[in-house]
Image (cartoon, grey):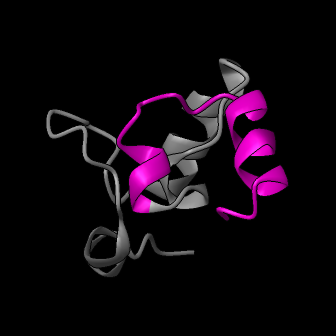
């Protein structure tokens, strides 16, 4: 399976600019799950910019109908 990094980068809403995993979704997902977090693509732009990628933050946003 080939990585579609170029296409992934176009859709990636991660605002953390020095991120070395941007566009490499499998690495990004593994990194965040190790920390009980979700990657930026699971959040709205507003939710992602808080840099709180926790499961709890995601659940709050879902409960508030913001995702």
Along the line of sight, the residue nearer the viewer: 3 or 52: 52
Residue shown at 57% from the left, 51% from the top: 26
The quarter of the picture where the N terminus appears is: bottom right
Residue 40: image location, x then y, percent: 48, 50
Quadrant location of the C terminus in the rendered image: bottom right
Res 35 → quadrant: top right
Q: Position of residue 39 (x, y in %)?
A: 55, 45
Q: Position of residue 65 (x, y in %)?
A: 75, 64
Establish if 3 lies above or below 43. below
Q: Residue pushed farthest top?
A: 35
The picture places residue 11, in percent across and down from the top left corner, at 35, 76
Q: Which residue extends farthest left?
A: 18
Q: Is residue 56 magenta?
A: yes
Residue at (42% x, 31% y) in the render: 51
Name of the residue lying farthest toward the bottom: 7
Question: Image check: 18 left or right of 59?
Answer: left
Q: Is residue 18 left or right of residue 24?
A: left
At horizontal 25% and vertical 37% (from top left) the residue drawn is: 20
Residue farthest front in this picture:
64
The image quarter in which residue 7 lies: bottom left
Q: Which residues are magenta?
A: 45-67
């Amino acid at each position: 399976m080939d990585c579609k990094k170029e296409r992934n980068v176009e859709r990636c809403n991660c605002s953390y600019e020095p991120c070395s995993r941007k566009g490499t979704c499998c690495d990004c997902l593994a990194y965040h799950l190790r920390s009980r977090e979700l990657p930026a693509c699971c959040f709205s732009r507003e939710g992602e910019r808080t840099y709180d990628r926790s499961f709890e933050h995601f659940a709050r946003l879902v409960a508030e109908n913001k995702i």
